Amino acid sequence: MTTEDDLYERLATYEGRPAAVAGEGGDPVNAPMIRHWCEALGHPVPADGTAPAPMLQVWTMRGLSTHPGTAGGGSRAGAYDELLALLDGAGCTAVVATDCEQEYLRPLRPGERITFDAVIESVSPRKTTRLGSGHFVTTRMDVRADGELAGRHRFRILKYAPARAPGERPRRPRPVVNRDNAGYWEGVERHELLIQRCSSCGTLRLPWLPGCNTCGSDAWDTLPACGRGTVFSRVVVHHPPFPAFAPPYAVALVELAEGVRLLGGVVGVPYDKVRIGMPVALEFRHADGEPAVPVFRAEV
């Protein structure tokens, strides 16, 4: 029988082993990407044309269609996958990103090619958190521009076993309720979907916001949704697995009859039958005593 000490002894052997080898950025540093990043974050475009330092990770990220071993992703080392599989086998099947650190050694200039290598820097002894107990895994990526070390990026995850009482079923994530959206969730508990309406210009908004994004007014009232809509867009979730859900399942962006849009699960048809333009009707569901959430039933 493997003890916790035995497990950590095995985990510690992965420290110093590669997590990615000979990675290449999908594109050289370039002005359009710099401009787009600055516009998205409200960051001033550097006058000297260099990339803002916090963009360090941008140049190393894989695209949606890129696979390990190809340009833009590098080759993920087997040691890293082995480490994650070992943690999965020990019951640490959930994962959450906890923090990252970046070190900037010199600016990145348009035209430079980005390459990188990553190493498993540390694996912590077992830690107990509010989420559950598990191990923190830290990787360090060395980023080079035209072969010269330009920065370092440390990324830390927690691989953990979700905290549950013996025999307790996995719980779904609970909605985050704050002073700006409390009224919305109170309405959902009453099986009402309340849309905000600006008292100044009449613009409807959903999700709720503290002020109108059309005229800036902070005065508003609410309008109950009629409960009819159509699928505007949809995605089928296959990964990552989450104990309270059984993938694959469909999630849709639904355009309500009032003109606003809302994300929600689609029920009543198989996940692969959800189509753009499909009419849906609003329902409210409680899962295992959890708070109510809005879902959409396909009308076929």
Image (cartoon, rainbow, N blue to C red):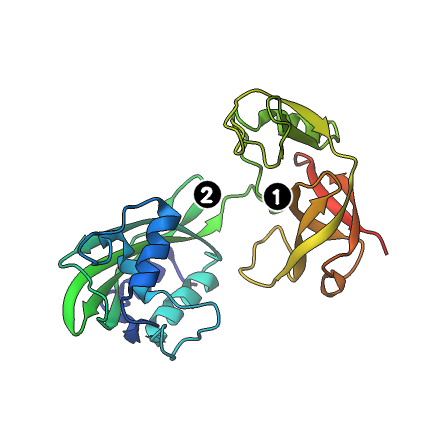
- Which residue: 57% across, 37% down? 175
The image quadrant that residue 273 belongs to is bottom right
Q: Nearer the viewer, mark 1 or mark 2?
A: 2
* Foreground residue among 158 and 213: 213
Residue under pointer 2: 131
Q: Is residue 189 above or below residue 43?
A: above
Image quadrant where one finds the N terminus: bottom left
Q: Please give left or right for residue 132 compared with residue 114 in the image.
A: right
* Foreground residue among 131 and 20: 20
Labelled disc at residue 216: none
Q: Please, what secondary structure does the residue beneath circle 1 have? A: loop
Residue under pointer 1: 168
Tag 1 and tag 2, C-beta contact below 8 Å? no
- Which residue: 39% across, 43% down? 128
* Foreground residue among 115 and 165: 115
Q: Residues within 10 Å of mark 1 (few under 14, many from 20)?
A: few
